[in-house]
Amino acid sequence: MIAVIDYGVGNLFSVEKAVTALGAPVKVTREASVIRAAEKIILPGVGAFGDCMENLEATGLVPVIRDLVTSGRPLLGICVGLQILFDGSEESPGVRGLGLIPGMVRKIQAPGLKVPHMGWNSLNIRARREKADLFAGLSAHPYVYFVHSYHAVPEDASLVTATTEYGERLTAAVARGNLQATQFHPEKSGDVGLQILRNFISS
């Protein structure tokens, strides 16, 4: 079973629908016991970094998530669900993220372009992994759907598995051990997004 963490933010039911369409059992939940029993975890998120962390902390699930990640449970972060894996964000100064990936979330610098970066854009896949490769079966430059004003900058640049170009080079996906995350929305990215979710489910 795959648990989609419900903490009051994110496209929970869009993610649930996409996973269900792929034939995998899935449950949207904020119950710690259900999340602990899940084979894999999806952490979605939309809105402001600070609001997402406040909501997540209110559920009491922060230590549960940290424990499961430490134990090796696969986790997929989506959009702000990627950002809160980091130490903090310029969007919400003083608010601590989960700290599971060292680094900060920075404001997009795109002079002359509208921010947020919203719509379809191509990926530059930088790294493919032998195991748990989100991009297996995809071309080097597939199109996916973004909605964001900030992007993550890990201290270790080798953790960036895909980028996109919008005024500057932006982090589009990261991976660290059993953690993987996308800044874009796979549940809104058509067949490419479904393949990415399929790769996570089947890995």
Image: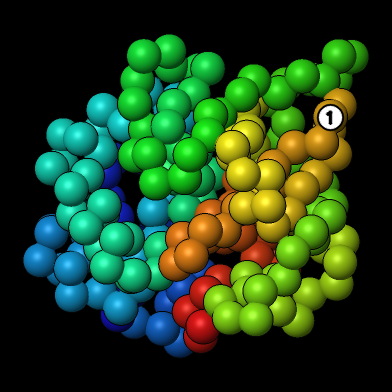
In this view, 179 is above or below 103: below
Give the SS element for disc 1: loop
Q: Nearer the viewer, residue 67 or 29?
A: 67
At 59% from the left and 37% from the top, the residue drawn is 155
- Asked if residue 71 shows in the view, the reply is yes
Would residue 155 be found to the left or right of residue 58 on screen? right
Would residue 59 be found to the left or right of residue 28 on screen? left
In this view, 31 is above or below 19: above
Task: Please state the horizontal and vertical placement of residue 189, each as a whole percent of the image.
Answer: 68, 59
Give amino acid for label 1.
Answer: Glu
Task: Please state the horizontal and vertical placement of residue 197, each as a whole percent of the image.
Answer: 56, 71
At 37% from the left and 33% from the top, the residue drawn is 97
At 79% from the left and 59% from the top, the residue drawn is 126
Task: Please state the horizontal and vertical placement of residue 2, each as a whole percent of the image.
Answer: 33, 73
In this view, 51 is above or below 78: above
Q: Identify the residue position indicated by label 1 in the image.
A: 168
Would residue 95 be found to the left or right of residue 119 on screen? left
Q: Nearer the viewer, residue 62 or 16?
A: 62
Instruction: State the colouring used for the structure image.
Output: rainbow
Task: Please state the horizontal and vertical placement of residue 145, each as a whole percent of the image.
Answer: 70, 49
Number of other residues with Cα within 10 Å of mark 1, as a class: few under 14, some 14 to 19, many 20 or more: few
